[in-house]
Image: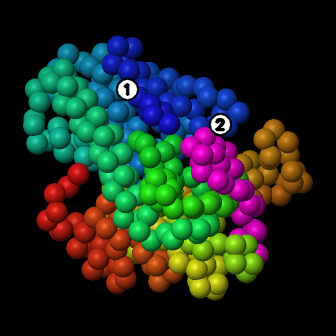
Amino acid sequence: MKGHIRLDRESGTLVLLDQRMLPVSEEYFYCRDTRDLIYAIQEMVVRGAPAVGVAAAFGCVLAARETAADFSALREGADDLDALLDALASARPTAVNLSGAVARMRKVRQDNDPESFSELIALWEAESERIYREDEAVNRRIGAFGAELLAPGDVVLTHCNAGALATAGFGTALGVIYTAREQGKDIRVIADETRPLLQGARLTAYELHRNGVPVVLACDNACALLMRKGMVQKVVTGADRIAANGDTANKIGTYGAALLAEAHGIPFYVASPLSSVDMQTPTGDDIPIEERPESEITYFGSRRISPEGVGAYNFAFDVTPARLISGIITEKGVLRAPYEQSLAGAFTDSRAPI
Ligand code: MRU
């Protein structure tokens, strides 16, 4: 899944594998400017917290190029550039990687104080490449720490897609599975289909199958039965935002899977880079939850599946309380409760960053 997010310097476009089309066809979506990228994020051409963060970092380069077309001096165009960055950072509200990546790019500008657009663009091209490379390296470390938690023969249930497609490459939850299998452990996966946009059926099943990992689909509401039957040994999911107390927002349905795991005595792990941890958000109640159009629920593809005039709740994410999480697998190791301390410690950990 290499190259699903790529800044093409020659054409000045950001090239995204269009995840809406998977697994039926592999098509690319070309972002010429910030508006195209905001559309791509909102329509989920690119999705998954780290992938959206990486795309937004490249998007800052697009924003700088676009502003440079209207202003000759960076000083004159500063307000327009800031407005584009604000719009980009708030394209989707839940995953903190999006606003985090834009904030990191802004800090590079502030620290280096470039005088011209060309200087700024060079700085941001380098920083966005760094964010891209770091993300994949971080995922490999998450994979190594997480693989230790899996035993040969385990069946792992996962929800949504926290794989290569959701990151710069390799994946978080799926990275754990890939690594365990690289170590020779016979791990199989149950992918929740993940209503309503079917990231599990379309994307997780696609990338696991492509990589030779045995995977079986289940509808989201089969979770309790599968656990009751002893068909699931571990649950591993990704995260969109982890609050300072460990409460974790992830795709709608994750909270239910965590409650069911607790009821059946099954460990529930979150695999996440520290870039998805938001120490400024005290608890899960403070995490903004995206609400998406009703039509994603009232229609199946182009076919209406509910009566005209009946609405639908379409919260895209839910929050799993920290008490249900057996461990948070990060690039600094597996963090355990109490998460206030272990998360804070991970940020002050003196081990060299990736
Ligand atoms: O709405 P999506 O598809 O962007 O939601 C994605 C998820 O919930 C993922 O599990 C999460 O972003 C982690 S990806 C490593």
Residue 204 seen: no
In space, the residues marked 1 and 2 are separated at their CA atoms by 21 Å
Tell me residue 243's x, y (percent). 38, 70
Q: Amino acid at mark 2?
A: Leu
Chain part drawn in magenta: 201-225
Taking the image as shown, residue 21 lies to the left or right of residue 134, namely right
User: Residue 339, which numbered label?
Assistant: none
The chief SS type of the magenta part is helix
Q: Secondary structure at mark 1?
A: strand
Tell me residue 47's x, y (percent). 52, 44
Residue 125 seen: yes
Taking the image as shown, residue 110 lies to the left or right of residue 59, namely left
Residue at horizontal 16 percent and vertical 57 percent from the top: 352
Residue at horizontal 19 percent and vertical 45 percent from the top: 107
User: Residue 7, which numbered label?
Assistant: 1
Tell me residue 46's x, y (percent). 52, 39
For this rendering, which residue is in front, 57 or 353? 353
Q: Is residue 80 above or below residue 325?
A: above
Q: Is residue 127 magenta?
A: no
Q: Amino acid at mark 1?
A: Leu
> Looking at mark 1, is its residue's CB closer than 8 Å to ligand 1?
no
Q: Is residue 289 above or below residue 49?
A: below
**Mark 1 nearby-residue class (10 Å; few <14, some 14–19, many ≥20):** many
Whether residues under marks 1 and 2 lie with C-beta atoms below 8 angstroms apart, the answer is no
Kindly indicate the quadrant of the structure image that contains residue 340.
bottom left
Residue at horizontal 70 percent and vertical 78 percent from the top: 230
Which mark is first along the chain, 2 or 1? 1
Residue reaching furthest to the right: 307
Q: Is residue 215 magenta?
A: yes
Tell me residue 27's x, y (percent). 60, 26
Q: Which residue is mark 2?
A: 22
**Mark 2 nearby-residue class (10 Å; few <14, some 14–19, many ≥20):** some
